[in-house]
Each structure stands twice: as C-alpha cells, then as structure tokens.
Image (spheres, grey):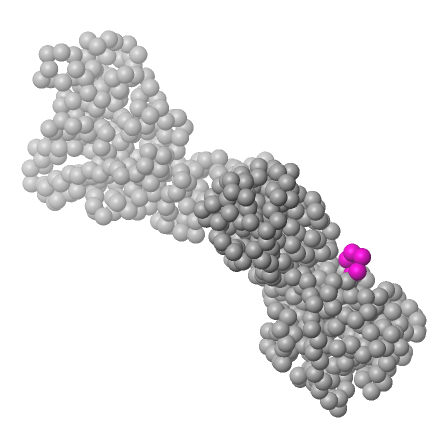
Amino acid sequence: MRQGILRKDGFWFGVRGAVALLASSMLVSAAFCEAPALPWHLREWTLRQIVRMEVFGAKPWGNTILAEFHAAPPLLAADGRDVRVVDEKGRPVRYQWVNEEGEVETDPFGKGKRPLLHLELTDPEVTTYAIYFGNPDAPAETHTWEKIALALMLETRMCPEGAVPKTWGEMTKLLARSNFSYGEGRRRQINDSENPYGPDERFISIYNGMLNCPAKGEYGFATDSDDASFLLIDGMPVIQWAGGHPPSGKFDHYATIKLTAAPHRIQYYLVQAGGGALAKAGWRLPGATEFETIPEEAFIRENPTRVMAMEHRDSPLNAFFTAHVEGALQFGSAGLVFTTVRFEDLSRSSVSKVTAWEWNLGDGRISRERNPSHVYRGAKRYEIALKCIDELGYESTWKRRLSLDTERVTRADIAMELTAEQVFALPNEPIRAGIKFRNTSNTPLETTLVTEIRISPTSVLKTDREELALQPGRWLAREASAGQNGEVFFDTGDIAFHLEYRGESVASRRIVVCRAADPGPALHVAQGKLLNDEDAAVVLRLSGRTGERQGLSLVERLKSGESVNIVTVDAALLGSASSNYLTDLAALLKERFPRATVNVSHFDPEDGGSRSDAALCGIVDIGDELAKLKPDLVILPGSLRDVLRFTPTDRFKRMFHARVDRIRARTQTDILLLAQPPTIANPKLAQDYAMRVKEIGMLRGLPVADAFSAFMTASGTTSATGGNDDRPWRQYYRDPDSDAPMYYVAPALQGQRLIAETLLAVILSEKPPK
C-alpha cells in the first residue's frame, strides 16, 4: 500500500477563546471541495496554509485582513521570518505578525500566544491567500502600510435641553434635530460613564460597530444606562430603556433575537439629559445563562478569514482538520466542564478521493464519521488523531493536541430534594423515598437517573436506570422503595440517586438506613431532616422485639446503701409545683432505703431547639446528653407536648421508640417508661398516647409505669370519657390553694405524688397504688 508523507515534527497553535492545538504529523493538500487548487508559486517553500477571506455585505471593509496561523516551529523559523504571502493570482502580499490587539508582534510563538497575521487587502475581488513557510534559509522581511480597519466608533452630539425620548420614533426625531457633533473616535466597548469628546451632561452618544456572532442561535441583548438607551441589530430596534432614569447596576432590561453565525451591525444610542451618565451594552450567547458586558474581542476590526487547507508541496494525500468549540457546560461552580467540540475534516487527496476516516478522539473514543461532534469531560488537554485513506490506498495521519479553555462556560445547576416517607422505620418496614430535581439552566439536558439500592458499598441489591429529558425550570419527581414485593429484605444500607450527564454523575443524593440502637453514626438535624456527617439523609431502623421483660438492677444497689443517679427525660410533666414526681420519688426511695443516697435530675431534650426541629434534635442528642449524667436509671415519659400538639399517634410511637433505642445505644443503662396521665382537656386523647408507650414497653421488654391508669383508677373513676370537673381524677390537676376550680396543664402536688408512687411500685416490682 502506498503511503503519504508523514511528518514527526510538532508545533503549537490556537483557536481564539476556545481551543489550543498541537499538530504533530504531515501537512495537507487542498482541503475539502471548497479549497481552490492554487499553483505552487514559491517552489523553495515546502509548506503553505490556504485561507479565504469571509466577505459579509457588498465588499470587504478597510484594507486589512486577519488570518490565524495554524503552524508553529519547528515547521518554520522560531520568529516566523520565513513566512511569505501571495494572493490567488500569485502576487506578493504585505503582512505583519500581530498580537490580539492588532499590534506588531516580534515573538508570535511565545508561550500562551495566538499566532496571528495581518495581510494587506489591495484587491477587493481577491478572497484567497496562500501563506508559505518551511524555508529556513529565507531572510526576514519587514512590511508596513497605513492600516484601515473597522472599529467600534462613538460619536457624541449635543442634546437639546429637556429632550428625553420615550420611544424609538422620538429618538429618530431627536437625532434629526441634533446636528452639532462634539467629536468621534474608536472605543473598545460600549461601556462609558462620561462623554470623552465634550461635556458630561446633555449629550447623545451614538455607537456603531460590527459584532462577530460566533454561533447560530438565540442571542440576548441588554442595556444599562443613565438615561434613555436604545440598541439595534442590523438596523432593527431590539431593546430600549426609554425615559429619564438612573442605572440599575445589572442587565435587567433585555430582549432576545435569533441570529446567524456571522458579523452583525450593532448600533447603540444614549441620551444623557442631566446628572450621571452611563452607556453599557450586554449580551448573552446562545446556551449561556447570564448576561455579560459585550467583550472587546466581540467587535470586529479586520476582515476575518477561514482556514481552508494546509499543503505540503510533495504530498499526494494529507489529513487535516479543524476543531470548533460549540459550547461548554459546567454543573455548579466547581463541577466538571462538558465541552462540545465539532471537528471539521479538511483532508483531501490530490490524486483521488478520500474514502475513509478514523478519529482517535483522545479520551478512548473512536469515530469513523467524517465530521464528528464529541463532548469532553473536564480534562484540559487531549491528543486528537485523524487517519484517512483515499481510493488509491494512500494513508495519512494528522495529530493535534486539544487544550480546552474553561473561562466561558454555561453554568447549570441541578436542584435535588430527597425525602424519606418515614424518618423512623419499623423493624420490618420497607423504605420508601422520593426525589425531586430541577434543571436551573436555560438549556434542556438529556440525563440518566440511576437508582441503586445497596446493603453495603460493594453489595448492590438493585439498580434502575431511566433516561430523562430535563426541561429548564421544571421539577421532575421520581420514587424508589427497598424491601417490598418479594424483594430481598432490606434492613440497613443505602438508597442512592445519581443524575448522570454524558456518563458522569453531576448531582446525587442518598438515604442511609442505619439502626437507631447502634452507637453510630454521628447525626445532626437540618430543615427537619436527619443527616449524617456527609450530609446524607438518614433513616433510623427501629429495633425489634427483645423478648422477656428486663428487670431493674437499681433495688439491689439501694439495698446495699450505694449512691444512685436517677434522671428523667422530661420538663412538661414535672410542672411548676414546689415539688414534683422526681423529688417525691427520691423521698420515697430514701424512706424505704435510708442508707442509700438518691440523686435525681432531669433535662429537656427539646430545650433550645426550634419548634420544627426540636423533637428530632432531642432524639439525636438524647443518648449523648444522658451519658454525660451517668444515670443508674433513666425515666422516659411519654411527653405531654406531643399530646397538646396533636402529634399523630403513629409518629409519636416511632419517635418514642427511637428515643428508647438511642438511649440504650449510648448509655447501656436501665430504662423505665412512664405512660403519661390523662390531660384535663381530653383524657381520651391522652389514653391513645399512653397505649403507645405501653406497646413500646412490651416490644422492647421494658418496665412501664402506667400513670394514666393510676390517675383514672386511684379515686374510683374507670371511664376515660366519663366525669365532669367534680370527678375524682381531676383533683390531681387542681390548685389546692385556690377556692376557685383552677387547673394546671401538668399535674399538681397530689398528681405529682401519685406519679412518684406509681414509679416506686414498678421499681419495687409492686402493684400500682389504689
């Protein structure tokens, strides 16, 4: 098989604001079918780049052409002295190496520089130019000419006093009346806070220029001004902010317009009627989410060109391509950048037809399309190689290094909200979770939702994948469950949701299911949710049946005359009386065991928390707080707060169960449950909560002091719904020092005493008092 010429040299060159590329193989012949077959005018030069001037409108502008040079040393001299330029008719063309500001450059291939050439335009009918290089013996040349190039021009005129147009029609009439010009000149941007050619009040600014719109699509244009301003594209009014007003400091006056990928004329008018002054124009590129001041480089100065080919004098087949960044998308401020690059094949055989292409896209992907488009993930440099074959069997390979610029990207954020059906799961209950997500960018996103149910980081029970099209600004909801409908039982583990874009996870949330009775993990509460130290949502799996009732070891220590610490997790039931059930219990135990020392204390697990998060915070912290007090017995009452808040009884039962598990996990001490007494307002309601406390006691094998039954039966009342204010059980809430029937929310002195006696009976394994 006959082979084309393959070069081993390497050189750098760049694509403005998007990519920088390193070529490391052969140069090519006339590119694509659009590239003209020019004679080789300079036989001593081995390489040349063909460019074509892009003419928009009736004729080119000025006398200067801008060409980006796509080669670098060692294929030419380090200072570019061997470059020569001729037009399509073979006539020499004056040129200069320049920087991005259009100034003469003596070191065009310095690090980070973009090699650019100015070519002199002498014949408006000529559009194709050949830039020759590859002759190291060629002497340096110096060319100069008086350059005439485009620029963003500003003219300021006198504004008639009091004239502030409110419509574009009024603005055109004002321009016709304003015939005195202060002056005009070039500007870099439409961003001025003064009149550079005259007074700073009562003037009209008129900006005219050409914008290079790099991509086809919907552009946004905006203005911020003091006072009236108008922005036109190709002579058509797009956005206005009429009347007298101060600037807003942001681009909140805007409109959109669909434009082609080409230069477009921009006109901007400001009428400054008095006071401050500001003329600022902004734009938003297709696919972008935010406005920015139109940058300097967007305004066209010289006639632009497009590279058509690179040719080697002796090569029958040459591979060549260009790369065009079509957009860059970043999820979050520090996430991966996904850059879409479109590759354009400019390969051509001078003796036959190119028939096959194979692209190594630099990240392990291969394409055999002629002009592939590819999305790169995050990394800044890739080596791209194109191999092509023609009908006669010639082969050629062109390699380039792709360096992605991430300065200008479209930001996209995925808002995700994850909720569990239950924060506290019963022993054999399936775990159900819901996820909502929203695309906050202005661009639709093709994503994949991956849901994994794992019993350990390496053991996955189930994986589901769903393709999702996320439209801008819309919420989308999905659900997942674990441990139901015949699935393998799911006790603890994760339910993880990953939203993938182009195979990479760009947003994720997970629910961690762990046992409430385990010492770990460390938990905290935020916005009504349990979270671990990784801020993952947590569901606590409640413990199952323990078995036989567990006895209390406290009595033996009391009999031995030891010191014991009794702590109650309560504030509401203690009330505000001078003595309470805790102090009464200490006195009763002291009477029974005079040699013992009985220390009593209490703390409120909800103290200091917000109303919404207090209950959860109390459950998270309850074990650690109790451990600090080193109790020998913990009394855990059913809270009167839950009764008065009308907490659903199922939720109350789960939370009470979780308190038991957390206390057991952190203290390993005896627990005595206390079923709350009836409440003055609704004894039947309190009975429902007391029953839940007794159920937890049976399930966990813990002793229960039933204050509800003690109150209802102590004076002969047997019905929770019967009785008026004179019924005997209500006496336990009545103020004994008041002649009027005044009742407390928490039990009064007699009621506190009865609760203490009920607790004592359970501690001593006696029957409750009558």
Q: Is residue 213 magenta?
A: no
**Residue at 49% of width from left, 41% of height from top?**
245
Q: Position of residue 266 (x, y in %)?
A: 66, 52
Q: Position of residue 333 (x, y in %)?
A: 51, 55
**Residue at 66% of width from left, 56% of height from top?**
209
> Considering only vertical position in the picture, is 105 above or below 731?
below
Label count reads 0
Q: Position of residue 165 (x, y in %)?
A: 57, 39
> Considering only vertical position in the picture, is 419 above or below 321?
above
Give the quadrant of the N terminus: bottom right
> Considering only vertical position in the picture, is 98 above or below 177?
below
**Type of secondary structure dominating the magenta stretch:** loop
Q: Quadrant of residue 657?
A: top left
Q: Is residue 57 magenta?
A: yes
Residue 36 left/right relative to 469: right
Residue 1 left/right relative to 734: right
> Considering only vertical position in the picture, is 112 above or below 206?
below
